[in-house]
Image: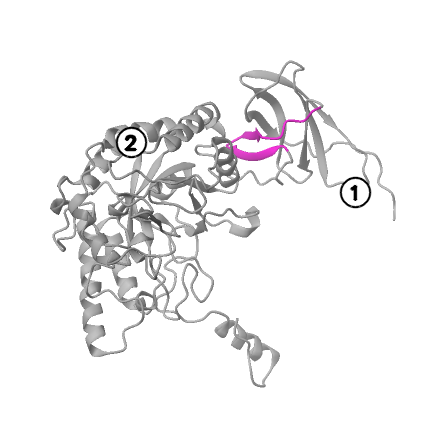
Amino acid sequence: MALATGGGTAMAQQAAAVKTDTIPLKYGAHRTGNRNDAEMERWRDYGLGQFIHWGVYAIPGGHWEGKSYNGAAEWIRSWGGNGAPANWKETYDNLYKQFNPTDFDAKKWAKQAKAMGAKYLIFTTKHHDGFCLWPSKYTEYTIKNTPYKKDIVKQVVDAYNAEGIDVYLYFSIIDWNHPGYRSAAPKTEKDSLAYEDFKQFTKNQLLELLERYPTTKGFWFDGTWDQAWIKQAGFTDALEKELRKIHPGLIIGSRFRADENGKRHFDSNNKLMGDYEQGWERKLPASYDVVAGRDWDCVMTIPPNQWGYNSDWKSSYVKTASDLSQMLMQAVSMNGNLVINFGPDGKGNIRPEEGNIAQQLGQWVSQSGEAIYGTRYAGLPKPDYGYYTKKGQQLFLTVFNQPVNKVLRLAIPRDYADEPKQVTVAGKKLEVKRIDMGMDRDKNLYYDVILPNDFNPKQPYVITIDMEKANKKQSTFGDAKT
């Protein structure tokens, strides 16, 4: 925040402060608040999504010639140093000639995603290596020049749309295959001319994707942290506007572009740079206050940090369906979506471990969907038992921590607009009692939900609480005068 300087009256100083409080920006955020159109409301209703990282990097699967790449498998083309195989980059750049995923079945993937409960998909059209899973007319490094030949992106889009799952296209700005790509800001005329060619190539491909796959709901951009791209504030601002103009309702996250001062995700006035915050990669906010009412999603791997296929999971902790269900509810309870990543192998198979996790999670989600889909932040402190979500006059408590005394004590702030009217679990009505704890100057009212003695669930479960307008005239014990 800029401060007023100089003399003059207090009013003049105040006016100067107002003028300099906001930094003038030509390429900052396009909006000062959240979108309220139908497309964005649909995005907020998703709850759960699927991410798929797939490409040529699935062939080595994190390993080559008995050597292991110490990094995320989809970055394996960048392998270098003494630990890398000889002539590795040349070897990798020719792997597309072996890419023939004969087991690939987009319909099978889509049915598995639907059974898991996913409402949207983010699919890698092109990762950092530059290999395109669609037959782009702007490069020869595409699926059409592999033994497989067929357009994979089209098959995925069609199959997922047929299952009622919206598709978002992942696109990496980094492109190690394009001769004009630069990571550092160009300093010579030669580099500048090469990068201008790369910018036009990138624009052409993005417009091509929207033309070929018009049901696309949005773009999920990656690889936008390079200084060369960050310095293109005018170009990226114009390109974003063009994409939105030809595809009204398009949803773009916060990592596509920077403002003229190089600020990403949030501009120099701390305004969100896209339609939702994209900074929650493999992490979740600690509280609702952190996201401050912004739209956001969390993309999450199943092993620690493997997005593309890695054949060896032995040394990694593999998240369970229980882990993911809790992450899902943590996200949804704070108005976010959770997107779970899958990395198919070189033949097009989703690995059995991932399939089992998806199936187990889907079984739980199918029983708990009322607390997930279309719900919002409840405006209540997080309970010790689990997570609140809300839809209209219904409050949902997803219980992960079962009380041993079979009593769920709900602490509802006295200034909350509503109070429990009826509580049910699995369609069965539960006894609920309003109690006064008798604590001096307590800001809460308490409601004890009594669970049946024979209620011993094996999984987290949802308590449905029908709310009504709170009675503000409840009597309490007198507070001490201090």
Q: Secondary structure at mark 2?
A: helix
Give the residue drawn at x 22%, y 73%: 191
| Residue type at the position of mark 2 | Trp
> Is any part of residue 218 visible from this angle?
yes
| Residue type at the position of mark 1 | Arg
Residue carrying label 2: 109
Q: Quadrant of residue 28?
A: bottom left
Vertical order, 448 against 125 (above or below): above
Is 446 situated left or right of 22 in this image? Answer: right
What main secondary structure does the magenta stretch of the protein show?
strand
Q: Residue furthest top?
A: 454
Along the viewing direction, whichever of 289 and 352 lies nearer the viewer: 352
Q: Residue furthest bottom?
A: 7
Which numbered disc, 2 or 1, marks the residue closer to the eye? 2
Give the residue drawn at x 30%, y 63%: 237
Along the viewing direction, whichever of 371 and 384 lies nearer the viewer: 384
Q: Quadrant of residue 427?
A: top right
Residue carrying label 1: 441
How far apart marks 2 and 1 lie (CA) works out to: 55 Å
Segment tinted magenta in the rendering: 385-404
Asked whether disc 2 touches disc 1, contact meaning CB atoms under 8 Å apart, the reply is: no
Q: Quadrant of residue 161?
A: top left
- Tell me the tag on residue 352: none
Vertical order, 371 against 88 (above or below): above
Vertical order, 409 against 262 (above or below): above
Give the residue drawn at x 25%, y 39%: 346
